[in-house]
Amino acid sequence: MTIDACKQLALAAPPIGKGQISEHFLAEALRIRAVEQKFLALFSAGQMNGTVHTCVGQEFSAVAVAGQLTDDDWVTSNHRCHGHFVSRTKNWRGLIDELRGLDSGVCRGIGSSQHLYAHGFLSNGLQGAFVPVAAGIALHKKRKGEAGIAVSYIGEGTLGEGVLYEAMNLAALFKLPHLIVCENNLYSQSTPQSVGIAGDIAARPRSFGLRVFEADTWHVESLLETARQAIAHVREQREPAFLIIKTYRLNAHSKGDDDRSRDEVAFFHTHDPLNKLLEDPRWAAVNAGIVAEIDTHVVETPKVVMPLQEYLRDQLPRKVSTRLLPVAYRKVRMVQALNQAYRKTLDEGAIHIGEDIHDPYGGAFKVSKGWMDAHPESVFTTSISEAGLVGLATGAALMGTPAWAEIMFGDFMTNVFDQIVNNLAKIHHMYAFQASAPVRIRTPMGGKRGYGPTHSQSLEKLLVGIDNVATLYLTSLVDPGPTVAEVTAFAGPALVLENKVDYGKFIWECPDDLELLREARPVGSLQIRPRNAAATLTLVAYGETARDLAEHLRTLFIETDLVPELIVLQMIHPLDIKLIERSVDRTHRLAVVEDGSSAFGIGGEIIARLAERKAPMLRVLRIGAEPVPIPSITSLELSVLPTAVRVIEQLLKSDLIESAS
Ligand SMILES: Cc1ncc(C[n+]2csc(CCOP(=O)(O)OP(=O)(O)O)c2C)c(N)n1
Ligand SMILES: [Mg+2]
C-alpha cells in the first residue's frame, strides 16, 4: 500500500454526516478523538506521566468493529488501544482516570495507556504477543460450545513479528473464531511500510487459508459494512479471518515523535472524515458538548491512588508449614506416574497443549500417551510454535480453563520467554488483579542422554528469576502425583520442570538406613536423612541430580567422611529455606548442587538467604555444571554435568572437608 494510493482513497471518499451513517457511530468517533486530544493536552500541561499513542485519524476502525460485538466477544489490542477500548466498553471516564494514574482508572492506574482491562477487553504494549492469547480465548469458546468470538487488533508494523504467524497457523488449524484486524496506517513508529514490510499483506493471512476482508478509514460506510461482514463470517463459520483497514494516524507515533512530511500529514488532515464532519455547525456543537463533558470529568475526579501495600500482593504459593510427613511409596516408573497425574487433570477439565502430544505417538518422552484417545476434545497437538501454544494456553486460562502447555525440550523455553515474562508474569498485576492466567508450562530439562548442546541444558536459573511465576522441579525420588495435584490449585502461572533421565526410572524406594520425609506445604521440599547417625553435611539438590545423589549417599560418606542429609527442592521459586536453615544449624556445612552452571544461580540465592538471616558459622560450596554448552559425547558430558561422582570430587577439593577434620 503506497501513500499515493491512500491519498486516492481519501480523495475519492464520499462525505459522512448526511444520514448514511448512524449518528451514534459518528458521536462515538468524535468522543474517541476528544479523549485522545485531552490526553495530549494533559501531557503538554505536564499533568500526565509515561506515554500515549493516540488513534486520531483511525477512530472508525474501532467504531466499526466494536459496533458488531456482543457481550460474549473478547478483544485484544495493542499500544494504540484507546479507541478500541472506548468503543468496546463505552467507559471513557475509566480510561481517562487510568491514564491519570487514579484508583478510579480501569486498572487502578497500574496499566495506564497500553495495558487496559475490562470484561471483553485486554490490551498490552507488546506487538503481536496477544494474538495467540486471543486465539486461546477463541479456543476456550469453541471447546466449551460458548457463543462469542475473539478479535485482535494489530498494526501493519506487527506483520514483522513471528508469533503472529504461529497464531494464524494455529487459529486456522483449529478453526478458531478469531478475527485479526490489521490497521495499516502506513507507518510503524518511524518506519514506512515500504521499508518495513516485504511483499503483499493480504497474501500472508490468505496463505493460511484465512478469508481476507479489506476496507479503509475514508469510506466509512463501506468500512462499517466490511467489518460487519468480517465479524459475521467469523461468528457464523466459526473460523478465523483477517480484516485489513487502510488508515492514517494524524498525530505523532506517541506524544511528539513525527518525522513524516508535513505536507503529507496536512493532506490527510484535510481529507479526514471527522475533520470534514466538524465543518458542519451542528456536529461542531455536538463535539463541543463532548469536549465539555470530558473537561468536567477531568476537573471533578478526585485524585486517589492505589496504596503500595495493596499493589504488592501476589499469587505465588507461599503457604509455609514446618511439618514433615512420611512419603507413600508406589512402584511405578516416573513417566507412568506423570502420565497418570496429568491425565487426572484432564479428567478434571484441564486442557493440555503441546507439540506431538497426540496418540499413538504420545509426546517426545511419552508422558502424554493415551491422553488424546481418552480426551480428544481437551488435548491439542500443535505445530512447532512454542510461543504460540503458550499464548493459546494463556487465553484459555484467562477464560477459566485450567491450561497446561508442554514444551518439548527445556532448551526451547527461550522461545516462550516473551509469553512468560511479559504476559504470564504481568497479567495479574498490570490489570490490577482483575485477571489471572494460571497456565502451567511443563518441560523436561537436563542432559545425560547425549542430545548435545541445544537439547540438554538446564535453564532453571533463567526461569526462577521471573517474578510472579512459580518454578518447581519434579523428581523421581517420590511419586509426583500428589505434587501435580497441588500445582493444579495454584492461583497463578507455574513452570513445572521434569527431567529426561528421570522419566525412565522407577520411583525411588528409600533404603532402610535412610528416612524420606516431605514438607507438608504445597510442593514442599523433601528430606532424606540417615536414621542412625547425626548429619554433618547439608546437601541441597533437585530433580534427577537429587535422585543421583540419594543413590550415592553411602559412597559420599565413604569418600568424604561427611554424613550427608539431602534436602530436595521441589518448589524452587518461591523458595522456602526453612528446612535448609534447620539442617545447617545442625551440620554447619552446606553444598548446593544445581543442574545448570552455578554462577548467578540457585545456590547463590540460597546462600544469600542464609547469610541474610544471620551470619551463621557455615561453610558453603556451590556445585553446578561447567559453564559451557553440554557436549554430546558421553565422557565429556558426564564430566561437565554435576553427577554424584563430580559432586564428591568437588567436596574433596573444598574446605568443607578441611573443616570436618
Ligand atoms: C515486541 C515489540 N517491539 C517493539 C515495540 C516498540 N513499538 C511500539 S509501537 C511500535 C510500532 C508499531 O507499528 P504498527 O504495528 O504499525 O502500529 P502503529 O503504531 O502504526 O499503530 C513499535 C516498534 C513494542 N512495543 N513491542
Ligand atoms: Mg502502523
Image (tube, rainbow, N blue to C red):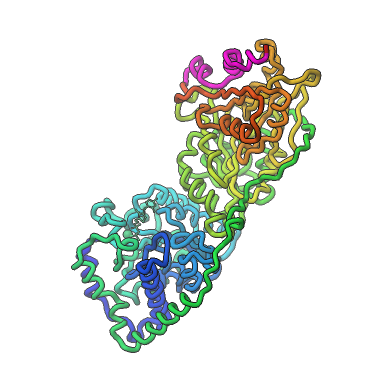
Give residue 305's quadrant in the image.
bottom right
Q: Position of residue 46 (x, y in %)?
A: 38, 66
Extreme-bottom residue of the structure: 282
Extreme residue toward the front, this view: 615
Work out whether 458 lies above or below 60: above
Decide if residue 335 is on the left or right side of residue 124.
Answer: right
> Is residue 211 toward the left or the right of residue 653 in the image?
left
Percent x, y of residue 468: 57, 47
Bounds of the magenta span? Answer: 632-660
Is residue 652 part of the magenta span, yes or no? yes
Magenta segment, prevailing SS (helix, strand or loop): helix
Q: Position of residue 464 (x, y in %)?
A: 55, 38
Nearest the viewer among 212 and 474 is: 474
Residue at 56% across, 23% down: 623
Is residue 148 visible in the rendered image? The answer is: no
Q: Nearer the viewer, residue 523 or 305?
A: 305
Residue 134 at x, y percent in the picture: 49, 57
Q: Is residue 320 left or right of residue 162?
A: right
